[in-house]
Amino acid sequence: MQADENLKIVFEQVEMPLVPVLSRMERNGVLIDSMKLAQQSQEIAVRLDELERKAFDIAGEEFNLSSPKQLQAILFEKMGLPVLKKTPSGTPSTNEEVLQELALDYPLPAVILEYRGLAKLKSTYTDKLPKMVNGETGRVHTSYHQAVTATGRLSSTDPNLQNIPVRNDEGRRIRQAFIAPEGYTILAVDYSQIELRIMAHLSGDDALVDAFRHGKDIHAATAAEVMGLDISEVTSEMRRRAKAINFGLIYGMSAFGLSRQLGIPRGEAQEYMNLYFERYPGVKRYMEETRQQASEMGYVETLCGRRLHLPDIKSSNGMRRKAAERAAINAPMQGTAADIIKRAMVLVDQWLLQQEPGTARMLMQVHDELVLEVKSSLVDKVESEVRKLMEGAALLSVPLIADAGRGENWDQAH
DNA sequence: CATGTCACG
DNA sequence: ACGTACGTGACATGA
């Protein structure tokens, strides 16, 4: 049986050999510029004070800006703002999406948003990371877990080094504190569009496979296909929408979800999805087959045979069943990507063991990215070897591409 | 310990 | 008619 062979592969070629690799990465640790983070903490503290005063002026009373409960009382009872969304327990939500919307008409939500963002950075990162520096090694050592996630991804705890900020400038300052020691360079190598490439491989869709084989900008190519244009005619807005469709497909999203994400009418979102499935019929077929496989067998599989069991796939509760269907769509893509990078990590580790000690160390894995510190004189050689090993970790019907960046810190390496 | 929120891919 | 994108971990609050 093919599936049984695959189950053997996922254990023998991926999980078991990865154990000592993870141990070495945990032992290596990463160097942190604690002074820089302490400085950032100070700056944030000053701004939090200002924001607290501002909130007091608007609300007319003192309250804890970190307390969703107190904030609900101020916004929705005292000030009478409209309730746009409720939490699972039925109370009015004050999450980022809601506050963004309310900020268009009222002053307080913008203050809360800025406060929340800064408070998060301070408590979770700029205050916490320096405290996690090991006294003997002078480095931060995470723990990687191989048997936590449903899809086969790793997870990272104490501290979690897989959710270090990157999406805005203030957050990126934290990445700038992840540094290489004297004489070394941070090398970050990440897979380009790995989950969409896996979707192309698993579905075998001609147009999608073709786009990747020709090295096209996949979001622009999708926009061109859906709109019936040449790729040169695609505007940035069209590309943005196509990107949302591509991401949504990986998550098993509905037309309603797409309309919310893009802020467009539901009918329009449905129209986009219809057009997409007309242009990429192989993807449509693959999605249908995956749902059917999940329903018939009660599980789905990654390329290497990792299984995700879906007990809710037969649920009479429509919401639970739909959620299970989305997980069934997503797991083969997310899980196959996890299998592939794990194989790459084993290969990179084997190669590093053959090198002169001190040449390079693998420090972190962030789902589609490997971060190493490399003796600066050898970074060209290590970069090309790591890219080659990552790109060769699986043979798909489309090219697997790994991009690299380097610098004195993790931010520069991107 | 549950809840709400938010950092990442 | 209804609710709606997958997978994680950490923090502050408050019962």
Image (cartoon, coloured by chain):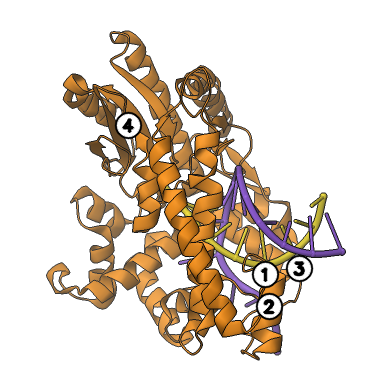
Chain colours: A orange, B yellow, C purple
Q: Is residue A77 left or right of residue A247?
A: right
Disc 3 packing (10 Å; few <14; some 14–19; many ≥20) = few
Whether residue A393 is visible: no
User: Does A57 appear above or below A158?
Assistant: below
Please state which of the two labelled residues, at mark 3 or mark 4, is closer to the viewer.
4
Query: Which chain's residue wears label 4?
Result: A
Residue at 39% across, 35% down: A33
Give how far apart the Cα atoms at labels 1 and 2 are: 6 Å
* Sequence-earlier tag: 4 or 1: 1
User: Residue A68 has which mark?
Assistant: 1
Under mark 3, the amino acid is: Asn
Q: Residues within 10 Å of mark 2 (few under 14, many from 20)?
A: some
Label 2, on which residue?
A: A72
Q: Which quarter of the image is occupied by the C terminus of chain A?
A: top left
Callouts 1 and 3 close, C-beta under 8 Å:
no
**SS for callout 3:** loop
Residue at 27%, 75% in the rendered image: A238
Q: Residue at x 25, y 51 (%)?
A: A212
Could you classify mark 1 by the number of other residues whose Cα lies within 10 Å: few (under 14), some (14-19), or many (20 or more)?
A: some
Q: Which mark is residue A390?
A: 4
